[in-house]
Amino acid sequence: MTEQLGAPQPATVIAISMHARSDLARRHFTDLLGSVMAHACHIQPATGQSGELAYTAIIPDNAQTLSMLRRLLSLQTEFAQSHPDCTTRFIIHHGLIFPSAARFLGAALRSAHSRLARLPANIRSAATVDFAEHVDTWPSKPITFSPLYTDSATMGLMAFSIQPNPDTEKPASLVHEVAFLRHLTTCLANHIGPFAEVIVDAARRSSTGNVQLIEELANEIEAPKAREKFRSDALAFSIRKPN
């Protein structure tokens, strides 16, 4: 039976792989990936190389791309610290996808995973030229790119780095900032569990100030009343003066 496909649409596609022998590590990575990213993008299983665990993240909304990329980098760092014997890698690409009833299909997904399979083992992340060209259409350029290699195996792949956000708010004291982040982490953990620390750290990197940070974290909470309480409590804490 032929799968019914919707109209093609442009999207950012991230091919992700994780190599581990332990089933516990594989489950931990799957849970972490879902907790950190699934609220703002679609994540579906993919076929990995040589038994690797593989997923594809599809981000149809440009407004979420930078935040999701920061979160994935933070997840990669966090997972490496807790599982130093495991290897996580990803390729970020941009192209056309086709939605179906329960998943996305298309050459963009195959291309991203094909390039990930050819990525040298010592390279943890890279971007395609297609994604670099897509970012070039954004009003601002928060990501910088440079050639990764010139050999045929990595043709069309770029190294990338994310520029730090300008601080648009009056900076609080260091003591207040640490206390505020600790407060956010504790409150968020009451709703989503132990992955709150990873999510707060990733959101901190992608936000330009306290208000945006609070809003991004509040969106992690599904229940409307709980979300609003988290938002009001966090805003009240953020305007307190440090002792």
Image (cartoon, rainbow, N blue to C red):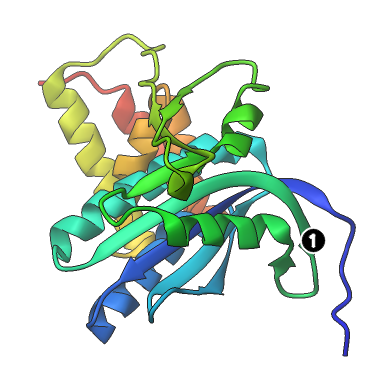
Closer to us: 124 or 154: 154
Q: Is residue 41 found left or right of 53 in the rendered image? A: right
The residue where tag 1 is placed is: 98
Q: Where is the N terminus found, in terms of image quarters?
A: bottom right
Taking the spot 39% from the left edge, 19% from the top edge, the residue there is: 165
Quadrant of the rendered image containing residue 24: bottom left
Residue 44 x, y percent position in the rendering = 58, 70
Closer to us: 32 or 233: 32
Amino acid, disc 1 = Phe
Closer to us: 131 or 182: 131
Q: Is residue 175 found left or right of 116 in the rendered image? A: left
Taking the spot 15% from the left edge, 63% from the top edge, the residue there is: 82
Taking the spot 48% from the left edge, 22% from the top edge, the residue there is: 142
Residue 40 x, y percent position in the rendering = 57, 51
Instruction: Classify 28 as above or below 88.
Output: below
Q: Residue furthest bottom?
A: 1
> How many other residues sit within 10 Å of disc 1, few (<14), some (14-19) or many (≥20)?
some
Residue 204 x, y percent position in the rendering = 34, 34
Taking the spot 45% from the left edge, 62% from the top edge, the residue there is: 117
Which structural element holds mark 1?
strand
Residue 151 x, y percent position in the rendering = 42, 41
Q: Look at the image and tell me whether residue 56 can be seen.
A: yes
Q: Residue furthest front?
A: 151
